[in-house]
C-alpha cells in the first residue's frame, strides 16, 4: 500500500517536531548537570524583574545574571539570595546556563558560596 505524499509529509513533520520537543525538554532537565559553573563576580547593581515574585537581575562588569526560581534547576531560593546580594560586593557563586551575548538568555545564580572572601556556613540541621 502506497501512502499519499501529503500523509508522508505530515508524518515526517510530526516526527521531527516530537524529536525537537524531546531534545528541548531533555536539555532543560539536564542543564544543571551540563552547564553548572562556579565563578567569581563583582556586583555593580541589582534589580527586580517588574512585578514578578522570585525574579531578579544581577549586573556585573562582564555579564548580567538572573536570580530566579526555576523548576528544572530545582531552585526556590531567589528571594533569600536577593537579600544577601549587594552592589559593590564580591561573590563566589554557582551559575547554571550558557551565556551568549547575542541571545537574550541569562545564566541563573543558584547558590552563593562566598561573600567578599568569607565562606558561608551551612545552617545546622534541625532535628524534630
Image (spheres, rainbow, N blue to C red):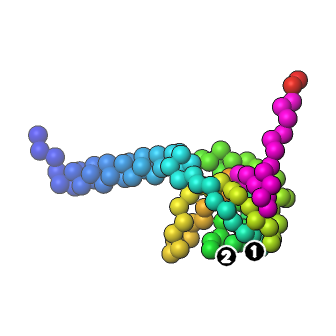
Q: Is residue 55 magenta?
A: no
| Residue 116: in magenta span | yes
In the picture, measured across the screen, residue 26 lies left or right of residue 89, that is left
Element type at mark 1: strand
- Image quarter where the C terminus lies is top right
Which residue is labeled 1 in the image?
44
Q: As drawn, is 61 to the left or to the right of 50?
A: left
Residue carrying label 2: 61
Tell whether label 2 touches label 1 (CB within 8 Å).
yes
Please, is residue 95 above or below residue 44 in the view? above
Q: Is residue 6 visible from the viewing direction of this image?
A: yes
How much space separates mark 1 and mark 2, taking CA atoms?
7 Å
Task: Residue at 17%, 51% (x, y): give it.
Answer: 4
Residue with the most extreme front position = 117
Q: Residue 84: where, in percent of width, then height?
A: 83, 58
Q: Residue at 74% of width from left, 70% of height from top?
A: 43
* Viewer-closest of 115 and 126: 115
Residue 48 visible, this orientation? no
Residue 56's quadrant in the figure?
A: bottom right
Q: Nearer the viewer, residue 47 or 115?
A: 115
Name the image quarter holding the N terminus: top left
Span highlighted in magenta in the image? 111-126
Amino acid at each position: 500500500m502506497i501512502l499519499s505524499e501529503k500523509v508522508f509529509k505530515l508524518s515526517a513533520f510530526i516526527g521531527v517536531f516530537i524529536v525537537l520537543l524531546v531534545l528541548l525538554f531533555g536539555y532543560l532537565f539536564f542543564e544543571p548537570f551540563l552547564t553548572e559553573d562556579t565563578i567569581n563576580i563583582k556586583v555593580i547593581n541589582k534589580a527586580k524583574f517588574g512585578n514578578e515574585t522570585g525574579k531578579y537581575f544581577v549586573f556585573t562588569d562582564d555579564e548580567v545574571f538572573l536570580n530566579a526560581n526555576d523548576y528544572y534547576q530545582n531552585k526556590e531560593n531567589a528571594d533569600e539570595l536577593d537579600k544577601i546580594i549587594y552592589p559593590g560586593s564580591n561573590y563566589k557563586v554557582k551559575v547554571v546556563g550558557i551565556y551568549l551575548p547575542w541571545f537574550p538568555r541569562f545564566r541563573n545564580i543558584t547558590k552563593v558560596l562566598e561573600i567578599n572572601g568569607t565562606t558561608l556556613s551551612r545552617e545546622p540541621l534541625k532535628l524534630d
